[in-house]
Image (cartoon, rainbow, N blue to C red):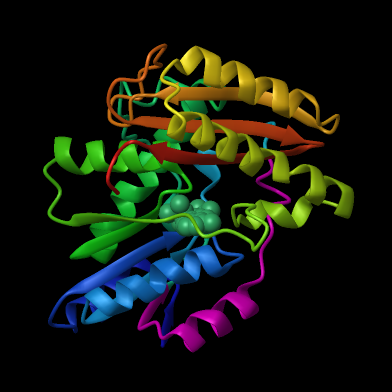
């Protein structure tokens, strides 16, 4: 496994390889959700590259950039165990040198949900992903359904700019009790960890109502809101039932629906989602 910290060295290592290259961009502090992406990537490509970069431009000043969890040694051990060929671990100034002043902005699908609650977030995501794609030149890039809106934004970025790669979306990996794996789960104390299960329970409620024939998004949203409000440690940022492609909010469900939510448990903001009525 080659661990590379500069753009020039990564490009040289990449060019030395023939065959397909799969790419998994991450912010590190790896868990089984990340490793599932790496395993799928390995299975589908001749070689696998993973980036670990806590991208400062996708955090707003009030967010958790400074305390975002990091453990480079452990991450590298896990990547070695799973079998990774190239790891790109640039310092921030390698990605954003002095004078950096070009931004990639996907309009429309970034305006709601996470975009509405985290101004500038997707501009940072789209910019760093575009830059990483230019450095890595992947055949395929792997993203988790856990970040459902991010997937829609990246797919739009790649389509609109005719980028020469395939985007592969992988299912959300969960803890045995249903909590979606996230690097941010480490912030939760035991009581908060228990309370955090309310996100999964709300999504399961939506699934059950939908399976029972309920097609009023408004009624499902109301039931989910009520369930979460019963958990005193939880504060709802949003609960959304949206068109999975446009992310436009629905009041009646006709085709499929992306049920997504963002909930604060103490100071920790968690997101999760499920897609209903669409083959995935
Ligand atoms: P992050 O390090 O949080 O930026 O995530 C890097 C990639 O891993 C993104 O494509 C995420 O959607 C994906 N990911 C994070 N958590 C999970 C999970 N629980 N299951 C599947 N993919 C995940």
Q: Is residue 1 left or right of residue 118?
A: left
Indicate the position of residue 233 as horizontal and vertical percent values.
Answer: 84, 33
Q: Is residue 37 magenta?
A: no
User: Looking at this view, is 214 or 276 the one in front?
Assistant: 214
Residue 246 visible (yes or no) = yes
**151 over 109 or under it: above or below:** below
Q: Is residue 4 left or right of residue 152?
A: right
Residue 143: quarter of image = bottom left
**133 over 107 or under it: above or below:** below
Q: Residue at x 41, y 36 (%)?
A: 149
Magenta part of the chain: 64-87
**189 over 103 or under it: above or below:** below
Quadrant for the N terminus, please: bottom left
Q: Residue at x 46, y 41 (%)?
A: 274
Indicate the position of residue 155 as horizontal and vertical percent values.
Answer: 25, 42
Question: Total marks drawn?
Answer: 0
User: Looking at this view, is 221 or 20 the one in front?
Assistant: 221
Residue 205: quarter of image = top right
Q: Is residue 275 left or right of residue 41?
A: right
Residue 59 visible (yes or no) = no
Q: Is residue 79 magenta?
A: yes
Indicate the position of residue 65 as horizontal and vertical percent values.
Answer: 65, 46
Q: Residue at x 23, y 74 (%)?
A: 44
Indicate the position of residue 112 as horizontal and vertical percent values.
Answer: 44, 21
**158 over 249 or under it: above or below:** below
Q: Residue at x 44, y 15 (%)?
A: 216
User: Looking at this view, is 19 or 224 the one in front?
Assistant: 224
User: Looking at this view, is 141 or 224 the one in front?
Assistant: 224
């Amino acid at each position: 496994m080659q661990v590379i910290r500069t753009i020039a060295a990564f490009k040289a290592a990449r060019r030395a390889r023939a065959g397909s290259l799969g790419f998994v961009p991450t912010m590190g502090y790896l868990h089984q959700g990340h490793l599932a992406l790496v395993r799928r990537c390995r299975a589908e490509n001749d070689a696998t590259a993973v980036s670990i970069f806590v991208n400062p431009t996708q955090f707003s000043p009030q967010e958790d950039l400074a305390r975002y969890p990091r453990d480079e040694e452990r991450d590298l051990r896990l990547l070695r165990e799973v079998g990774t060929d190239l790891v790109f671990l640039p310092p921030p100034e390698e990605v954003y040198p002095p004078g950096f002043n070009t931004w990639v902005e996907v309009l429309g699908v970034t305006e709601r949900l996470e975009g509405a609650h985290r101004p500038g977030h997707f501009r940072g995501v789209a910019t760093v992903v575009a830059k990483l794609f230019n450095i890595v030149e992947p055949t395929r890039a792997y993203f988790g359904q856990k970040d459902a809106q991010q997937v829609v934004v990246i797919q739009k970025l790649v389509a609109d700019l005719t980028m020469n790669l395939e985007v592969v979306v992988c299912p959300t990996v969960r803890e045995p009790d249903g909590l979606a794996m996230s690097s941010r789960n480490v912030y939760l104390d035991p009581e908060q960890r228990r309370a955090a299960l309310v996100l999964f329970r709300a999504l399961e409620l939506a699934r059950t109502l939908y399976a029972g024939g309920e097609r009023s998004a408004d009624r499902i949203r109301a039931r989910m809101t009520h369930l979460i409000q019963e958990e005193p440690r939880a504060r709802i940022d949003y609960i959304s039932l949206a068109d999975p492609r446009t992310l436009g909010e629905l009041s009646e469900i006709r085709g499929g629906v992306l049920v997504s939510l963002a909930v604060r448990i103490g100071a920790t903001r968690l997101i999760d989602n499920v897609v209903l009525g669409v083959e995935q």
